[in-house]
Image (spheres, coloured by chain):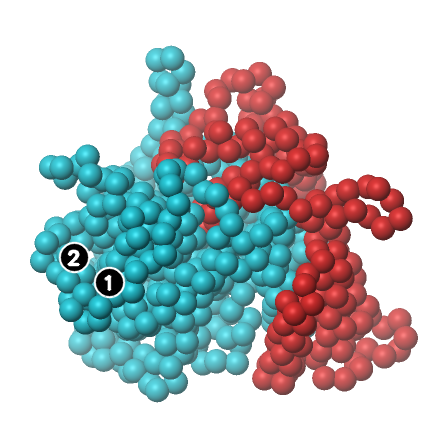
Amino acid sequence: MSALASFIEGAALIFTPVTLLLIVAGITVGLILGATPGIGPVPGIALVLPLTIGLQTWEALSLLFAIYVGGMYGGAVSAILLNVPGTAGAIASTFDGYPFSLRGEGRYAIEISVLASSFGAVFAAVLLIVSVPILVAVIALFGTPEYALVAIFGLAIIPLVTQYSMGKALMMAGFGTLLSAVGMPPMTATPRYTFGILDLSDGLAFVPVLLGIFAIAEMIKLTGYDGSLGDSQSGGADGEPTEPRETNGLSDLLDRFADIFVRNPLTFFKSVIVAIVIGFIPAAGGAVSNILAYALEKATAKDSESFGTGDVRGVISAESANSGTIASTMVPLLAFGIPGSPTAAVILGGMLMHGLNPGPGLFQDSVHLSYATFISIAVGGVLLLGIGLLTATQMARLTNLEMTMIVPPVVVLCVVGSYALSLSVVDVSLVVLFGLLGYLMIKYNYSTVAFILGLILGPIIEENVHRSFSLGDVTIFVGSPLRILLVALIVGSLVLPVAAAVYRRTAA
Amino acid sequence: MHREEKLLIAVVMAVSAAMFVGSFQYIQEAQYFPQVVALVTMFFGATIIANRRFNLAGEATTDLVGTVQDRAELEEQVHGDDDGSRPELDTAEPGSFRINLPLLYYTVPFTSYRVTHRATLAVLLVVYLGLVWLVGVFVSSVVFVLLYGKVVGLRRGVFAGIVAFTVAALLVFGVWLETPLFRPSHDLFGLTVMGG
């Protein structure tokens, strides 16, 4: 099938009235969840997952992609108005966004943020749509041993792309991988570690674990606080933010557009390219891309001293980068089943729930599904522009929600949602158990993302290592230049943080 | 090391050790993977413990995100004042945010014992799980919300809103997704299915 035919087939999945309506709903829900303290796109999508049981596959996935797009921008609202990033992808948005709020120009920064997020998501998705034939050719180079090595690399790189200490991140990755051994192994029909519980024969149910680790754990953390996010005296800048001014209509919006695409086009395009590259790296996502794009912009700017004082380039780079990552995080997910961000990990849960099993087979044999993914994200980006601009002021009000109010609805949705999936109290137990464990992980800085990635990648590693050994001995893993490169990347990812620590210690 | 962190590491190490030992009951091909992964997990767990005890390598991290969040200072505060006697700051996490609001406490009825709301929510979750097993998701969810409202002391209007939301959400699951809302997960009274 030609690329054009696949593209049209993919587009046909998205351009249906129901799917488009669901994208609108998803953007709105994503905006609300992203701007609501403590939720954000990761727990937000996990919460919505069980509700998608009644939808067709692409209706459900388009809804999840739209929540991702909306949620990524939604995190910027509290970042700009309160200096409190609603998501890790909005951290760099505080640097120059909050100073705008301090001088009464919060609305301007939010509008710039909407435009940069929207066009960032669309531009990256369009670039990837054009690149699909190249990606398919590259993925064809990956056989069973390469697939196993890519999955191991996905775990090895976690300490490099997250802020966690190496020991903690790898211990949690190992723990997640180990728990993935529960259930049916690839080489025998005898289940492992199920203790006779039938509900465990397919392994630990992924969605309940996600709900526990990402949503319940966040709620336990959130429930202790007295007041709303708006009451929080966040650190970083002196002074108090003033009320955002209203805009003067279309002429102001055109001026914002010119700020990005006429006065600072390089800032935008550089940041989106950074975002696309970062999205290919497992587990990195918007949390890394927004900071790297901001740092790159600041490092290459002639007048970098204005950064941190309310420079529009700071907001453009951070926001276009975090939304630009959305489409590219789907590439490792679709190609290898390896999520490029924590949010992509939750979306993987949705794909599995709806019978899609991402991996090289799916990517090569069902190219139209890749097109459908990128088209859905691009449509979401376009719709974000309108919905984001229309609701900017209302979103700011969400920061006044009291923390204690958010907890019970989320907990109930998690418990009932997990029960609804398989009508099993075992799944509810998983939600509670992993919620409590997840809270301890969050509190003591043990990577929840590493744990989830381990759970996802464990079966991929076991199956492909097992198959590789049926093709040859251990030297099969260095049997081609690509495999040697992958082994070098794994070793480098593990050695680099240790070498850096030893160097710092020696230097000190 | 804080006792909760010790508990987390103990759980990870104990599960790893148990799965390592338990793996020997399966056929040889199915043993390798859990054995190797359990050993790797226990190795990193031991590394963390050794590092804390002997300060071998400090907190080895490239800290891409942490560099902008002043983690060290925040961590010291959250780990340093866990005696539960005064407000504390929480750490900023990926996908999370920095908050420095005071923490809430709950005084256990008929005693003067104060626990954080986090601890009470943890207990409520376990109670909620037990109730789901005993009486199904509908009754358990309503009871959970009532207990939560009582413990946290939600304002009447807010509380009513949350109860309404909960019931509406349950009806969505029950009517649209056909989730049996009143079905317990036991057969204690010979009433496995009590309705849909």
| Chain seen in red | B
**Which percent across, then down, holds residue A276?**
25, 53
On what subunit does the disc labeled 1 rest?
A
Residue B134 in percent (x, y) is at: 82, 68
Q: What residue is drawn where x is 32% and y is 79%?
A: A14
SS at circle 1: helix
Callout 2 crowding tier (Cα within 10 Å): few <14, some 14–19, many ≥20: many
Q: In this view, does B119 lie to the left or right of B88?
A: right
Q: Chain A colour? A: cyan
Disc 1 and disc 2 in contact, CB within 8 angstroms: yes
Left or right: A395 in relation to B118: left
Task: Categorize mark 1 by other alpha carbons within 10 Å: few (<14), some (14-19), many (20+).
Answer: many
Instruction: Name which residue type carries label 1.
Output: Leu
Label 2 is placed on what type of residue?
Ile
Secondary structure at numbered mark 2:
helix
Instruction: Report which residue position mark 1 lands on.
Output: A115
User: Which label is found at residue A260?
Assistant: 2
